[in-house]
Amino acid sequence: MPNRLRHVLRGRSYHNQPLRTALVLLALLIILSKLVGHRAAIVNTSPSVAPGLYVRSSAEPAVGQIVDFCIPRAARDYVSARTGHTGENWYILKPIVAGPGDRVDTTGDWLVINRRQIAPMPPMSDRDGRPLPRWRANRLLGPGEFFVFSARIPNSFDSRCYGPIKRNEIASVRRPLLTW
């Protein structure tokens, strides 16, 4: 191995620091692309959950956990009208606020969970005047049912619109690795 290369690899050549930095960044990019390609890591850009990098967790879905799931059937007509796509292979990232045995009431002006007012119900239509779906019920969540909701923005597209999600619809539990 030539002396110059040996010095670069050992970190003794300070004028080649940009090359070393570029090689490290390239390696990280390759690793990250493999993780994202298998959905081990995802990038969230939606404001309803802190934007950032989220990684798959081995935890089971429970109240307080953040989960990702395919857009529910009850929401697909709205998603299609808004985006021109069915949303069939798109995922939503939301925190779970209620689970099996919790009482959820969306029949009034407020989302009520276990007799506690959580947040107002979303408006009847979105900012472009399209009618929003609304899930109207007052019932206990059954086994394997979870209610997702985000308080980060007032018009979050969550279970108030499409109802509870089922355990088998949840792709994974996520934890933030880096948020911004």
Image: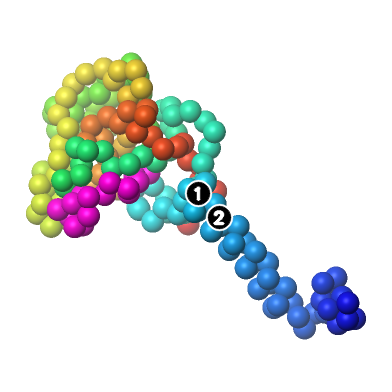
Distance (Cα) linking label 2 and label 1: 7 Å
Give neighbour class at mark 1: few <14, some 14-19, many 20+ (Cα, 10 Å): few
* In this rendering, position of residue 131 left or right of residue 104: left
Residue beneath disc 1: 38
The correct choice, above or below, for 65 with respect to 90 in the image is above
Residue 89 horizontal/vertical position (percent):
32, 48
Q: Residue at position x 62%, y 61% from top?
A: 28
Residue beneath disc 2: 34
Give neighbour class at mark 2: few <14, some 14-19, many 20+ (Cα, 10 Å): few
Disc 2 secondary structure class: helix
Disc 2, disc 1: CB below 8 Å? Answer: yes
* In this rendering, position of residue 132 left or right of residue 101: left
Camera sees residue 152: no
Residue 124 horizontal/vertical position (percent):
10, 43
What's the residue type where badge 1 is placed?
Answer: His
* In this rendering, position of residue 37 left or right of residue 123: right
Q: Residue at position x 39%, y 41% from top?
A: 68
Q: Residue at position x 35%, y 52% from top?
A: 47
The answer to which of 113 and 138 lies nearer the viewer is 138
The magenta segment: 79-93
